[in-house]
Amino acid sequence: MVSEPASSEDTPSLQDILDALDDPDCRAILRETAEPMTANELIDACEISKSTLYRKLDRLSQASLVRERDVINPGGGRTTKYERDFDDVTISMDETDTFSVTIDRPSRQSDERLADIWSKMGDEL
């Protein structure tokens, strides 16, 4: 299963981000997840195997570039969808020649923040 992305205050390592962005399958997933998609939809859209998809989603989640959302189905149960979790990634170097990374995230409505909290609570149970 994909681990939870880092919060907006917690930035992943530069290497995790570079590794994810260097991977062609991860880039394909990022292109497709502008809107939330299920794993099966991503498998079809990206033309990759299920095991590869989950490995790549894990890599993207470690880099805090994709987030997992559980959607409650009207008939019961829930469906997991994945979506891109950034608007912009900036890699810079300061005056001491140290690299840093900044991830600009989309703003979330209160219902989305509440859904994230409930999803995390469900994982704890």
Image (cartoon, helix red, strand yellow):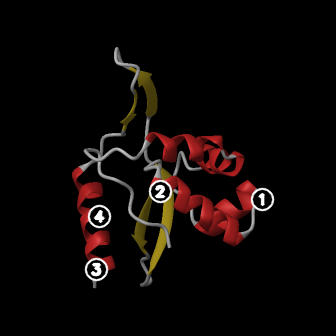
**Earlier residue among tags 4 and 3:** 4
Give neighbour class at mark 2: few <14, some 14-19, many 20+ (Cα, 10 Å): many
Q: Distance between the residues labelled 4 and 2?
A: 18 Å
* In the image, residue 74 above or below residue 98: below
Q: Residues within 10 Å of mark 4 (few under 14, many from 20)?
A: some
Residue at point 43%, 83% (across, down): 77
Badge 2 marks a residue whose secondary structure is: helix
Of the numbered discs 2 and 3, the one sitting upstream in the chain is: 2
Decide which of 32, 23 is in the foreground and name it.
Answer: 23
Drawn side of residue 27 relative to residue 12, left or right:
right
Name the N-terminal-most of marks 2 and 1: 1
| Secondary structure found at label 3 | helix
Q: What residue type is labelled 3?
A: Glu
The x and y percentages for residue 53 are 65, 64
Residue at image coords 52%, 53%: 60
Label disc, if present, on residue 124 of the rendered structure:
3
* Residue behind mark 4: 115
Residues tagged 4 and 2 counted as in contact (Cβ below 8 A): no
Q: Is residue 6 above or below residue 87?
A: below
Distance CA(mark 2)–CA(mark 3): 18 Å
Question: Are the two marked residues, 4 and 3, in contact with CB atoms closer than 8 angstroms?
Answer: no
Residue 102 x %, y %: 37, 32
Q: Marks 1 and 4, how far apart in space?
A: 30 Å
Mark number, residue 61: 2
Residue occupying the point 63% across, 50% down: 26
Front of the two marks 4 and 2: 2
- Labelled pair 2, 3 in contact (Cβ < 8 Å): no
Q: Which of marks 4 and 2 is nearer the N terminus?
A: 2
**Which circle marks residue 47 in the picture?**
1
* In the depicted structure, whether residue 56 falls above or below residue 23: below
Q: What element carries label 1?
A: loop
Q: Earlier in the sequence, mark 1 or mark 4?
A: 1
